[in-house]
Image (cartoon, rainbow, N blue to C red):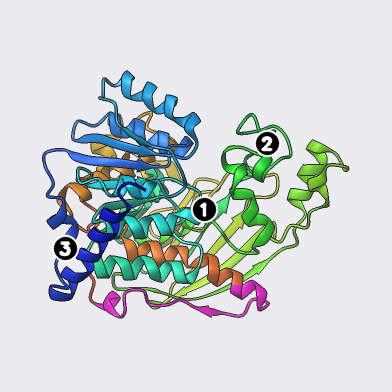
Amino acid sequence: MSSRREFVKKSALIGTGLALAPSFTFAQDLNPLKDKLRVGLIGVGLRGTNHLQNLLYRNDVTIVAVCDTDTRRMPVVEELLQKHNHPAVRQFTTHEYDYRNLLAMQDIDAVIISTPWLWHTRMAKDAMKAGKYVGLEVSAANTMEECWDLVNIHEETGSHLMILENVCYRRDVMAALNMVKQNVFGELLHFRCGYQHDLRFVKFNDGKTAYGKGAEFGEKGISESAWRTQHSLLRNADVYPTHGLGPIATMCDINRGNRLVSISSMASKAVGLNKYIVDVGGADHPNAKLKWKQGDVITSMISTSNGETIIVTHDCNSPRPYSLGFRVQGSEGLWEVDGSRMYIEGQSDPHRWDEAQPWLDKYDHPLWKKYADRATGSGHGGMDFFVLHAFVESAKRNAAPPLDVYDAAAWSAVTPLSEASIAANGEAQEFPDFTRGNWVKRKPWNWNSDQF
């Protein structure tokens, strides 16, 4: 590729400089930030296009380049740019590693990676080596090696990475976070969370429409069915833990005075995907003969160093309404999202639930009070505005983000650890300390701020 040599040379120079000054932040040195953050997007499918659209509404961002091997996405990008009167951008569409040519561009400060899961870590590593500030979609890593790779490259280069876990910014979740930080629930004891979402219509389609039709996947599918479904065929693990665990981790200051210690996981039998294929495509459909490895319901129990317990559920292969199943419980009360109920000792009627919404309204987070109007229409009930806002503001300052590389590694580690635990009939697995002991002295993020 035309700029491969420059990319390798630049990466080598970063490593050499770090040997002389290991505490130096090279992202800032290589790309001094100007009034506007200069952004490149790697992956402009449905998720990447959503990020692009939200970035175009900001006056402190300039889009410089986009990369996607699916050339059908480029007219969509061009239409969005024209709609917002934004100049044309460079397009990288030639081959799988063309994203490295985007990373070699000197006029890009930050990149957002919205690609299939197996590309997340390798692209993030290359981006950090190139001195870019990285926004990485969830999950950040698939294996324990990849989790450590993200941490090691960050520490070697000084380039920052933010995991773009948007559920951390859901309005009710942030209100509950506000209640936690104001000690309304008392001393924290227990949490429940997960990803409970019927994704059968996402994992299969007819190869023409993204959602809701057909029983094809892989090479015969499109959109997420082209890559996501394969994980259910090959892995018995919680492959998508961060939507549930991320918000809980912020509440109990994981990696900042607390850490995840151990996990024990078990999986139910796997019948949901086969039943869906038969129902939609018939018993003679070739995919009806496949044996799916991922259990329909995967339950993990996590312990923390401060003594809290967390139950995480992955439930995506069976018919059910959507819920992330949040429960936040302390010594003085609890909130449960299912049923929209709250109980605070001394304030609620004894042994009777309160409707949760008045409590959530009372403790509405300062960020939502300030930016709710701007968040309208940004996607996922406004969450997409907030996670992108935090990314842009952190990148403009070249500062550590609220959801950093250590969070990305710890939350994503649930996947390989749950896989190992399930294979060992629920045997507990230890979480690595990705902070190398620094969680003891790292200060909690200021989640009461109304800035980002």
Q: Amino acid at mark 1?
A: Arg
Q: Which residue is mark 2?
A: 205
Q: Position of residue 373 (x, y in %)?
A: 29, 29
Q: Amino acid at mark 2?
A: Asn
Q: Position of residue 195 (x, y in %)?
A: 55, 52
**Numbered circle sitting on residue 19:** none
Of 265 and 141, which appears nearest the observer? 141
Tell me the crowding category of disc 1: few under 14, some 14 to 19, or many 20 or more residues within 10 angstroms, Cα based.
Answer: few
Q: Residue at x 47, y 40 (%)?
A: 69
Mark 2–mark 1 Cα distance, whole angstroms, equals 45 Å
Q: Which residue is mark 3?
A: 25
Q: Is residue 402 part of the magenta span, yes or no?
A: no
Of 342 and 255, which appears nearest the observer? 255
Q: Nearer the viewer, mark 3 or mark 1?
A: 3
Determine whether, in the image, residue 172 is placed left or right of residue 132.
Answer: right
Q: Are marks 3 and 1 in contact (CB under 8 Å)?
A: no
Of 77 and 401, which appears nearest the observer? 77
Q: Residue at x 38, y 59 (%)?
A: 346
Determine whether, in the image, residue 306 is placed left or right of residue 338.
Answer: left
Q: Which residues are magenta?
A: 420-440
Nearer-N-terminus badge (3/1): 3
Tell me the crowding category of disc 2: few under 14, some 14 to 19, or many 20 or more residues within 10 angstroms, Cα based.
Answer: many
Nearer-N-terminus badge (3/2): 3
Q: Which residue is mark 1?
A: 352
Q: Position of residue 134 (x, y in %)?
A: 30, 52
Q: Quadrant of residue 66?
A: top left
Q: Residue at x 27, y 28 (%)?
A: 57
Nearer-N-terminus badge (2/1): 2
Q: Is residue 430 part of the magenta span, yes or no?
A: yes
Q: Secondary structure at mark 3?
A: loop
